[in-house]
Amino acid sequence: MEGVLLRRAAQLLGSARRVVVLTGAGISAESGVPTFRDGLTGLWARFDAQRLATAEAFHADPDLVWGWCEWRRARVSRAEPNPGHLAIATIQTRVLGSTVITQNVDDLHERAGTRAPIHLHGSLFAPRCVAAAAHPATFEGTSDGEPAQPHEGRRIPPPRCASCAALVRPGVVWFGEPLPEAALTAAVEAAVACDVLLTVGTSGVVHPAAEIPRVAARSGAAVIQVNPQPTPLDQVCAINLRGTAAHVLPALVAAAWEETGEE
Ligand code: BV8
């Protein structure tokens, strides 16, 4: 990756007052969590993630979709944040006006020390009653804590809501479902107000999340992309850093604050 581009990005980041960091599956790839682009494996190999992550799939075969989310939750629980996650936590300490927004349903940003990342697409750690999200998260009859998982995964019957005995569903946003309003509003407001937006490890194809870098660019911010591959976001970016999150982000953070001589 060209040093010139990294230094320019570092200057922008180091002198920014309001920073937004938007992440996708690529930030967790180097922690061993497969991206959505990486085909599914094991029991799910014959399914397409985008089709499995729908209310239709859950209602058609709740044990399959619950089993899939428990398998992913087990993998995430065994994974560790990588230097990319840690660098983002550092940006949050260095720039008080910074907001971290993620499309990921894992908890690796939190485990890296990032405070209150905005989860646009929910979390694998927030199951809720399918009938009423307001019902307390107390469930009958499933694995709490560490689910025992055969490597290839297995169907697992979802638990039942202790209040109304309805099925419990994963706390993620399925395709065709609206994003949590408060999260989307906070994300758009941060994008409008920021002077630098860092988009990391996202293919920029899932909406409305993919609009966030465009909102920032339209509001005059400098958008910096970290991705080993080109994406549809390239043309709205001031700088495209072609590399992986765990390699580029620590170098960017080191250069940004060396640049301004702030120790
Ligand atoms: C909705 C939770 C309406 C579930 C997820 C406009 C245009 C076209 C389509 C639409 C549109 N508006 C809406 C749609 C439909 C749809 C959509 O966007 N479809 C796409 C696929 C065409 N959007 C929706 O359905 C949304 N809801 O619109 O509701 C509505 C409104 C009101 C009332 C009723 C309804 C909901 C979208 C959210 C779906 N849920 N996840 C679960 O996880 O089980 S999305 C899921 O996929 C992830 O959360 C993530 O967002 C997305 C995957 O994208 P990425 O994170 O970018 O990952 P990907 O694998 O694609 O790419 C990885 C990238 O990383 C690559 O670029 C790669 O090069 C890079 N990379 C790899 N390794 C590294 C790396 N980068 C750095 N370092 C590395 N080491």
Image (cartoon, rainbow, N blue to C red):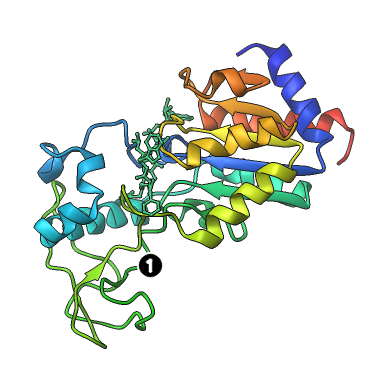
Residue 66 image position (x, y, % from top left): 19, 60
Q: Tell me the residue at 51%/25% (across/down).
A: 227
Instruction: Classify the position of the C terminus by image quarter.
Output: top right
Q: Nearer the viewer, residue 248 or 98?
A: 98
| Count of numbered labels shown in the rendering | 1
Q: Quadrant of residue 206?
A: top left
Q: What residue is disc 1 on?
A: 126
Left of 224 or right of it: where is 134? left
Left of 146 or right of it: where is 193? right
Q: Tell me the residue at 43%/47% (across/down).
A: 104
Residue 61 visible in this rendered orientation of the protein: no
Q: Quadrant of residue 148?
A: bottom left
Please state the quadrant of the image where ligand 1 appears: top left
Q: Tell me the residue at 67%/50% (across/down).
A: 189
Residue 41 image position (x, y, % from top left): 17, 38
Q: Is 59 rendered above or below residue 174?
A: below
Q: Nearer the viewer, residue 173 or 263?
A: 173
Outermost residue to the right = 261
Residue 258 visible in this rendered orientation of the protein: yes
Q: Nearer the viewer, residue 58 or 145?
A: 58
Q: Amino acid at mark 1?
A: Ala
Q: Nearer the viewer, residue 226 or 103?
A: 103
Left of 38 or right of it: where is 56? left
Residue 96 image position (x, y, % from top left): 78, 52
Q: Tell me the residue at 13%/37% (across/down).
A: 45
Judged from the image, the secondary structure of the residue bearing numbered disc 1 is loop
Residue 15 image position (x, y, % from top left): 84, 35
Outermost residue to the bottom = 163
